[in-house]
Image (cartoon, grey):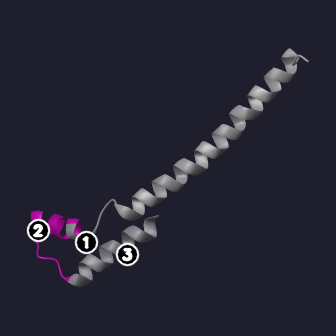
Amino acid sequence: MTIEVWQFVVYLILALIVGLVIGFFATRAFIKKQMEKNPPINEKMIRAMFMQMGRKPSEAQIKAVMNSMKNQK
């Protein structure tokens, strides 16, 4: 019982496609989890950025910047 060459090629291509799909969704889930755990920017960073510019930010300004960043996604 031998597998023909064309059957082997078809199985190889199917395995590659299935692997790519599984890899894509697994990587996507991992990245989402990491982004929730370690957001790219937080209120503390915004406050430090304002202070570097020589301004004392109010909570309203910080919330406005956070909301504008969330809306950009």
Per the model, the C-alpha gap separating discs 3 and 1 is: 11 Å
Q: Nearer the viewer, residue 5 or 63?
A: 5
Is 5 a magenta residue?
Answer: no
The disc placed on residue 51 is 2
Q: Secondary structure at mark 2?
A: helix
Q: Quadrant of residue 14?
A: top right
The residue carrying mark 1 is: 43
Image point (8%, 68%), residue name: 54
Residue 43, given in percent of the width and then of the height, sits at 25, 72
Q: Is residue 51 above or below residue 30?
A: below
- The image quadrant of residue 35 is bottom left
Q: Quadrant of residue 53?
A: bottom left
Circle 3 packing at 10 Å, graded few (<14), some (14-19), many (20+), is few
Question: Label 2, label 1: how many angstroms apart (C-alpha)?
Answer: 12 Å
Residue lying at 18% horizontally and 70% vertically, measured from the top left: 47
Is 68 placed left or right of 5 in the picture? left
Q: Looking at the image, tell me whether mark 2 or mark 1 is earlier in sequence order.
A: 1
Image side of residue 66 versus residue 21, left or right: left
Q: Give SS at disc 1.
A: helix
How far separated are the C-alphas under marks 2 and 3?
A: 19 Å
SS at badge 3? helix
Mark 3 and mark 1 residues within 8 Å of each other at the beta carbon: no
Proximity of marks 2 and 3: CB atoms separated by less than 8 Å: no
For the point 66% across and 38% down, the residue is: 19
Which residue range is magenta in the image? 45-58
Q: Amino acid at mark 2?
A: Met
Q: Which mark is residue 67?
A: 3
Task: Looking at the image, tell me whether mark 2 or mark 3 is earlier in sequence order.
Answer: 2
Q: Residue furthest right?
A: 1
Q: Residue at x 41, y 57 (%)?
A: 34
In x, y percent, where is residue 37? 37, 63
Q: Position of residue 11 (x, y in %)?
A: 79, 28
